[in-house]
Amino acid sequence: MIAPALTKNQTLVFDVLSHSDGPLSAYTILDKLRDHGFRAPLQVYRALDKLLERGMIHRLESLNAFVACAHQEKACCGAHGHGTVAFAICESCGHVVEFHDHAVDHRLDDWAKQRKFKPAKTTIEIRGLCETCSA
Amino acid sequence: MIAPALTKNQTLVFDVLSHSDGPLSAYTILDKLRDHGFRAPLQVYRALDKLLERGMIHRLESLNAFVACAHQEKACCGAHGHGTVAFAICESCGHVVEFHDHAVDHRLDDWAKQRKFKPAKTTIEIRGLCETCSA
DNA sequence: CTGAGACTGTAATGTTATTACATCAATTGC
DNA sequence: GCAATTGATGTAATAACATTACAGTCTCAG
Ligand SMILES: [Zn+2]
Ligand SMILES: [Zn+2]
Ligand SMILES: [Zn+2]
Ligand SMILES: [Zn+2]
């Protein structure tokens, strides 16, 4: 049940994302990897898909962009395997904070159970201004 | 402080959305309005922007699509002016349910207050299978 | 060796959204 | 009345994001 090593392309894409201080679009990643032999969007999208599957990165739907997972190992709820993660995105400086809130999770889960809706993936994104930018 | 009437284009776009049984992309709306003289995406996007401003429609970020607001007037929290609205989206039949949960709202608000983050717009979208489709 | 499965490279295409510029109509101030 | 402003519109071009299709490579179980 141990995950296989990342492939070369997956590693390259993940490295770019982990060293970035903000979310990156697929095409921005492509540009950053031209020197490493990347030529086509698909090379990026394929790697992103695998990294998403593993939970190593997240997609910000409201931005069409991607970030490396910033989850604290063993934050609150024991082993990683995060349930639903939420993001606060500053529209001024682009800074993103990833967090997790049990109460919100439970609440949405309850809603789903009552409606017999089977959640597959939940997106929570708060756009606004971070402390620094709203000062 | 009374809102001005909708323009012709805004009315056309809103009508298409309210009569649809599911979310529509901007280009789908465009196609449906060719007979009414629509020729370019911008005609649709401009109308959508105004309708979004008024809260008459919502954008589903995870779908790049739009729906008419399905809020019950005076649901739970008094007058419309909904705080944050959430969506459950069936990935099989495309059906969308719009709802509002106070507890979730408060919880996210508290998080923001603690971090001194000023929320402008919050997106909550649950993708999954509706009762019918998961049976 | 060989067939299956996973990864890769490349080109072409499809889908979503915006920029730029010209025009028209209603409103405002003089 | 008549500029000046404001907001809506029409059109074309382009940018940004994502997928389909097809072919080649590599690894490994049988
Ligand atoms: Zn994470
Ligand atoms: Zn900021
Ligand atoms: Zn609504
Ligand atoms: Zn369904």
Image (cartoon, coloured by chain):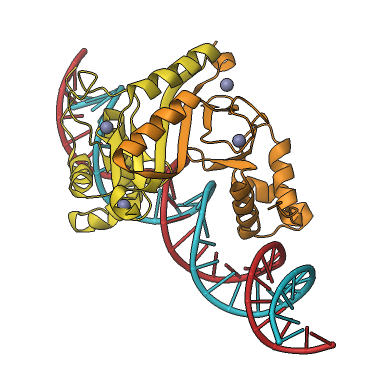
Chain colours: A yellow, B orange, C cyan, D red
Q: Where residue A66 sits: x, y (%)?
A: 32, 43
Which of the 4 quarters of the picture holds residue D12?
Answer: bottom right
> Residue, x 45% and y 39% (percent of image)?
B122
Q: Note whether B71 is above or below D3 in the view shown.
A: above
Q: Where residue A39 sits: x, y (%)?
A: 29, 55
Q: Nearer the viewer, residue A92 or C14?
A: A92
Classify residue A87 as left or right of residue A21: right
Q: Is residue A71 shown to the viewer in this render?
A: yes
Q: Note whether C19 is above or below C13 in the view shown.
A: below
> Residue, x 18% and y 45% (percent of image)?
A15
Q: Where residue A10 sits: x, y (%)?
A: 22, 40
Quadrant for ligand 3 reads top right
> Residue, x 46% and y 33% (percent of image)?
B124
Could you tell me which quadrant the N terminus of chain A lies in? top left
Which of the 4 quarters of the picture holds residue B57?
Answer: top right
Residue located farthest toward the top when viewing the structure as drawn:
B135
Q: Where residue A112 sits: x, y (%)?
A: 49, 17
Label total for image: 0
Q: Is residue A23 shown to the viewer in this render?
A: no
Classify residue A55 as left or right of residue B98: left
Could you tell me which quadrant the C terminus of chain A lies in? bottom left
> Residue, x 59% and y 25% (percent of image)?
B93
